Image: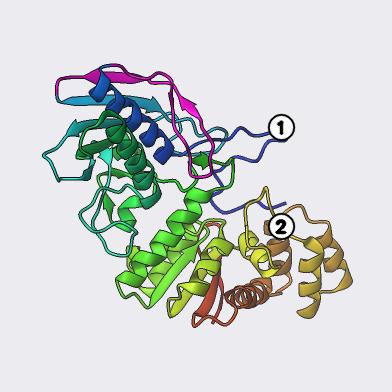
Amino acid sequence: MDTGENEIRLEKPATALRRGWTTGACATAATKAALTALLTGDFPDPVEITLPKGETPSFALARETISGTCSMAGIIKDAGDDPDVTHGALVMASVRRLPEATGIVFKAGAGVGTVTRAGLPIAVGEAAINPVPRRMMTEVVTALCEQYGVPVDIEIEIAIENGAELALQTWNPRLGIIGGLSVLGTTGIVHPYSCAAWIHSIHRGIDVARAEGFAHVLGATGSSSEKTAQTFHRLSDLACLDMGDFAGGLLKYLRTHPVPRLTIAGGFAKMCKLAQGALDLHSGRSQVDMEWLAARAVELGADPALQDRIRAANTALETLELTRNQGIDLPSIVAARARAAALSTLRGAPVSVDVMVTDRAGALLAHAE
């Protein structure tokens, strides 16, 4: 059993999980409804869109307004059973006609962030609306303008109710996305517990760090270990990547987008799982192998009685306390094995790695360089 450092996410239930829709899909549907109303006077409700893989979901409108020059439609985001901070948020699109030859212009409304740092897929100064949602909205607008014989000169302003507050629960401020949330999505579909958005943010954090010329980044499993490692290495906030449980998502991206040095920091249980070869460290998707820990303790001189107590232990924390009481430095061998697992996943990429193991209070237990 893994007690986990700062574990706040829900366990995966035994029943089938319901998928949901990305912020980008909601914004696209709202854009289509708003522009249809601007051109015809009527809002389609529900409004149907085509996603990148061909699915054609329909969305009910939660809000609609229209004036002579501007129209707005809002859709409540349904993320299904995914633990998404934007689940239930109102995503709104306002559209207005622009002067001829202006083209399509995207704006960040209230609750949508603006990019302030290089390294993201959107230029500095632009609304934090990612490329795939931009393409989806562009396709919808182009098709409607051609259908009704009007120039494709449209401003699209996306807003998310309470988005600025919700963004404080994300890593947008650290990534240099200021003022609100990002409009994300690649397929339009949120797959429950795929945590694609989390891994996406890890990738964007690496992109920003590379664009800023950082030679050293930190991936930590939680806030306690991050604070310890950040202080130890004197790293800026921007160098701290929100790895969480997704060591694999971090390491695989660094394999093709290397940074010269990587520090991985985490609690004892999480680092045990990485040392055992797990790349997803969530308690619902990987477990600490007590037999493996007993074998490591033998390498450090554990007697048969201690080996049996380790095998019968309920948690990694219990194992740590058992070995500590007998002067066996299990964290050091865990750190070394975790470092080896990280290097193996990097497959020779030019990234040097050190691993720091902390206790639940953040105290450093071991450091493998």
Within 10 Å of disc 2 (Cα), the crowding (few <14, some 14-19, many 20+) is some
Is 146 on the left or on the right of 67, as rendered? right
Is 290 on the left or on the right of 120, as rendered? right
Q: In which quarter of the image is the C terminus?
A: bottom right
In reply to whether residue 103 is colored magenta, the answer given is no
Residue with the mark numbered 1:
15
Label 2 sits on a secondary structure element that is helix
Coloring applied to the structure: rainbow
Q: Is residue 160 visible?
A: no
Is 302 on the left or on the right of 3, as rendered? right
Sequence-wise, which precedes: disc 2 or disc 1? 1
Q: Position of residue 56 (x, y in %)?
A: 51, 32
Above/below status of 124 relative to 155: below
Circle 1: residue type: Thr
Label 1 sits on a secondary structure element that is loop
In reply to whether residue 48 is colored magenta, the answer given is yes
Q: In which quarter of the image is residue 17?
A: top right
Whole-number angstrom distance, CA of label 2 to CA of label 1: 31 Å
Residue with the mark numbered 2:
318
Magenta stretch bounds: 42-68
